[in-house]
Image: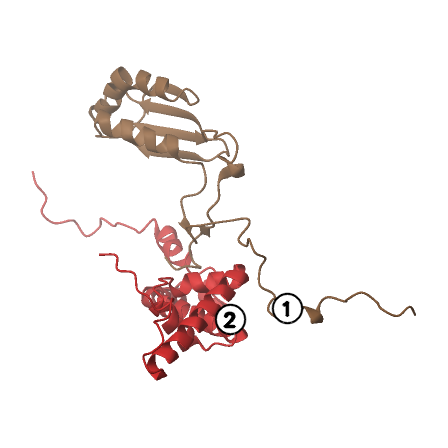
Amino acid sequence: MTGRGTASRFLTAVLHNGVGRYVRQLQRLQVVFSPVAPDARGARQFVEEEAVDFARRHPDVVLYVRPCDCPAPVLQAEYLNGTVREELIASKTSEEIVQLAAKLASQSGLDIVRIRKPFHTANPSVQGQWHPLTNKPSSLTVRGPRTAPQ
Amino acid sequence: MVLLSVPLWLRSRLTDRFWRVQEVLKYARHFRGRKNRCYKLAVRNVQRAFVKSTKARKQKKRFLRALWITRIEAASLEHGLKYSAFISNLFKTQVELNRKMIADLAIYEPKTFKSLAALAQRRRQEGFLAALGDGKEPEGIFSRIVHHY
């Protein structure tokens, strides 16, 4: 849990998302649950009631519903840069699952590690970055017009 | 039938020793020497690293503030002002910029910093006039205070 012992990254947007059109980074969302298990009750309620509304509200996310014989109900999110995130939804209510799905939809697929600075800019300087000759008289840098011909 | 004590021939063996060791060694991988490989040495040094990292959170604030002050001092000396004069006069003109922002301006926006130094210099002169003058001259323009309440 040290600064150098754990991974960290700088604040970025995936491929400058948002400069032009905003592209949602969530590609597909899979709801994997068992139709019989008791802890998948919230997942079943979500699939019955809220899943269609969620899919309508987020038209660029593909929602897959997979009832299968799995040990624990899981919400699997795949992003455009290839990261796959799995979130357990065992013993969660339908509203909590909706909130979780909305949170996953708003994330980009970048790693969730410490962000070194909460700001990032490609053009930090408007007036020109300081260099040792900034505040010196311009006679040191500018060669004036040549007066006498050589 | 409830068995209250385990028979002596029943052994339980530790099967996940590898992962328990890796949990500690993963924080020691960037160390130098044998303490990045050997568990016995790594345990002590990982503990020290965590303790130092906890204490350093307060020290980081001190270090960064000292760094900003050094940078502001260097930049204001380029314009002929000492750091103490610069900061005190900027405070008196109600320019509420913290040292971090002033240091960033000095690096990335040198003309803005030059104007701030000029403002502080002018306020300094007005302060001298007010203190040493006879009270016949009007108050300085930059010595006016805006009340926000």
Disc on res. B75:
2
**Which one is nearer the viewer's eye here, B135 or A143?**
B135
Residue A74 percent coordinates (x, y): 32, 29
Q: CA distance from mark 2 to mark 1?
A: 12 Å
User: Regarding mark 1 in the picture, which secondary structure is present there?
Assistant: loop
Quarter of the rendering containing residue A133: bottom right
Amino acid type of disc 2? Ala
**Which one is nearer the viewer's eye here, B40 or A80?**
A80
Amino acid type of disc 1? Leu
Residue at x-position 45% and y-position 36%: A109
Residue B89 percent coordinates (x, y): 38, 72
Residue B15 percent coordinates (x, y): 33, 49
Residue B37 appears in view: no
Q: Residues within 10 Å of mark 1 (few under 14, many from 20)?
A: few
User: Regarding mark 2 in the picture, which secondary structure is present there?
Assistant: helix
Quarter of the rendering containing residue B98: bottom left
Quarter of the rendering containing residue A37: top left
Q: Colour of chain A?
A: brown
Disc on res. A22:
none
Chain of the residue where label 1 is placed in the rendered structure: A
Q: Do the CB atoms of the residues marked 2 and 1 lie less than 8 Å apart?
A: no
Q: Which chain is red?
A: B
Disc on res. A133:
1
Residue B19 percent coordinates (x, y): 37, 51
Chain of the residue where label 2 is placed in the rendered structure: B
Q: Is residue B149 left or right of residue B77?
A: left
